[in-house]
Amino acid sequence: MKMGRFRRKSCLTALAFASFIFLIVIILKNASQDAFLDLPDAFVEGLPLKVNKVEHKQPQEQQQEQQSDMNNNADAADAAIAAPVTDKPLDTKDTKDMNMDADALMAKYPAPNYNVHAFYYVWYGSPQFDGKYIHWDHPVLPHWDEKVAAAFPKGRHSPPDDIGANFYPALGAYSSRDPAVIDAHMRQMRMAAIGVLAVSWYPPGTSDDNGEASDNIVPLIMDAAHKYQIKVAFHIEPFKDRNEKTMFDSVKYIMEKYGEHPAFFRYTTGTGKALPVYYIYDSYLLNEEDWALFLKPNAPHSVRDTPYDGLFLGLLVEEKHKRSILSAGFDGMYTYFATNGFTYGSSYRNWKSVKVFCDDHSLIFIPSVGPGYVDTSIRPWNSQNTRNRLKGRYYETALSAAVESGSRVVSVTSFNEWHEGTQIEMAVPKVGSPPYLDYSPRRPAAYLEITRKWAEKFTGDWLF
């Protein structure tokens, strides 16, 4: 649900050019997905960019979908809302690993790599632990164009069999506060050699538009993470009234409440300072002058040279954000989106030049990689932004691009963002009409294995 508030500029200047782009989209839709990975990024960037973060309001200035795309998806989306499904069991090997004694599991798998981070979401709820389903019952989001929206279903999903996702979790429609679920997640991250989980965070008493307050889950996560030698960083969301003052208050709260926990992640810089790491989602929503009041030394609400100082990473979406992130006083940048070509920042072909820019200005660059993208369960009109997994090849292409960029650290989008189909968490087959996607012919733990294989390539200091 992280594609929101990004407002693209129109790339169509004439009717003839618009027709050409439409023709290319139709060709790409019917072409082999293997070929898609081999296309130049400039070609990919020509596709419509219409995915928006679920907990944010939909943008009002977007181009209308092509009518043919709209009609092709409507019937399938209707069937997806309430189709009955049945479970299939986990692979035997995966079941054995998940039930293994914690010490035996840690002895079997490599130590966590603290240069491999994964974005982690705690907004899910179930009747047993929360009194109701939360987020799994996600509403079907309307297209911003009323004419397009009219062709697609409305309403909410109905868990546990019908959830707001195109894949189905091996743990079922779980609660993020279930201790058994949290432990299972830490086991899976340890199997993947993930060293740092970046927990999606809102201040106490606040949440995204479709969830409920979840700060009180963080202590459970930190205790479980420590058991498996995993560290916790914070992915600060664009909470209401986020500005330089409320950011200072939030960081102060995080440090005072969680800073002494052994799972709290700190990175030791070249100067010997051990500083916490904060990913700041949608950082561009606040202008660089206001960010500077928080991030520059001697500013009115400066965090610098205080007990609450840290390493703050801004979100790189458009190319111009490189300069604004630098001017604002951020310590680095990350790209978040798992869709190659969706933004300047998420396009693999740009990562080498971004890394050079960051090196030249002593900034940290953390590219974000993902196994794929699909959100048509909650945005049935958005199939053009789907990135098929290709049995793991899409993910490995992203990881390879991150290595080739020269970055020593990488972030994974995501461990468990099920709504947008970017998860590496174990998934199982479900049958229905249409059926849920799954990782076949690979095992439920396939993306944990791929992560573990590539983790050893990310080592060394984050800054040269």
Image: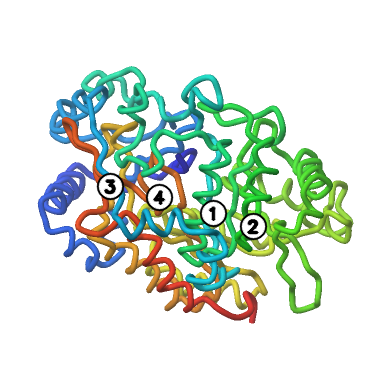
**Circle 4 — which element?**
loop
Please tell me which of labels 2 and 3 falls first in the chain.
Answer: 2
Please tell me which of labels 2 and 4 falls first in the chain.
Answer: 2
Residue ID for mark 3? 386
| Circle nearer the viewer, 2 or 4 | 2
In this figure, which colouring scheme has been used for the structure?
Answer: rainbow
Give the distance between the C-alpha atoms of the residues marked 2 and 1, in whole angstroms.
9 Å
Q: Quadrant of residue 248?
A: top right
Please tell me which of labels 4 and 1 falls first in the chain.
Answer: 1
Toward the viewer: 80 or 315?
A: 80
Residue ID for mark 4? 423
* Amino acid type for the residue under numbered disc 1: Met
* Amino acid type for the residue under numbered disc 2: Lys
Q: Quadrant of the N terminus?
A: top left
Q: Residue at x 61, y 55 (%)?
A: 314
User: Within 10 Å of the Cα at label 4, are there few (<14), some (14-19), or many (20+) other Cα atoms?
Assistant: many
Residue ID for mark 1? 186
Horizontal arrangement in the rendering, residue 284 relative to residue 148 (left or right): right
Please tell me which of labels 2 and 1 falls first in the chain.
Answer: 1
Q: Is residue 437 visible?
A: yes
| Circle nearer the viewer, 3 or 1 | 1
Q: Quadrant of residue 321?
A: bottom right
Please tell me which of labels 4 and 3 falls first in the chain.
Answer: 3
- CB under 8 Å between discs 2 and 3: no
**Coordinates of residue 121 in the picture (x, y in percent):** 53, 43
* Amino acid type for the residue under numbered disc 3: Thr
Q: Residue at x 69, y 35 (%)?
A: 216
Horizontal arrangement in the rendering, residue 67 relative to residue 123 (left or right): left
Residue 112 sits above or below residue 218 on the image: below
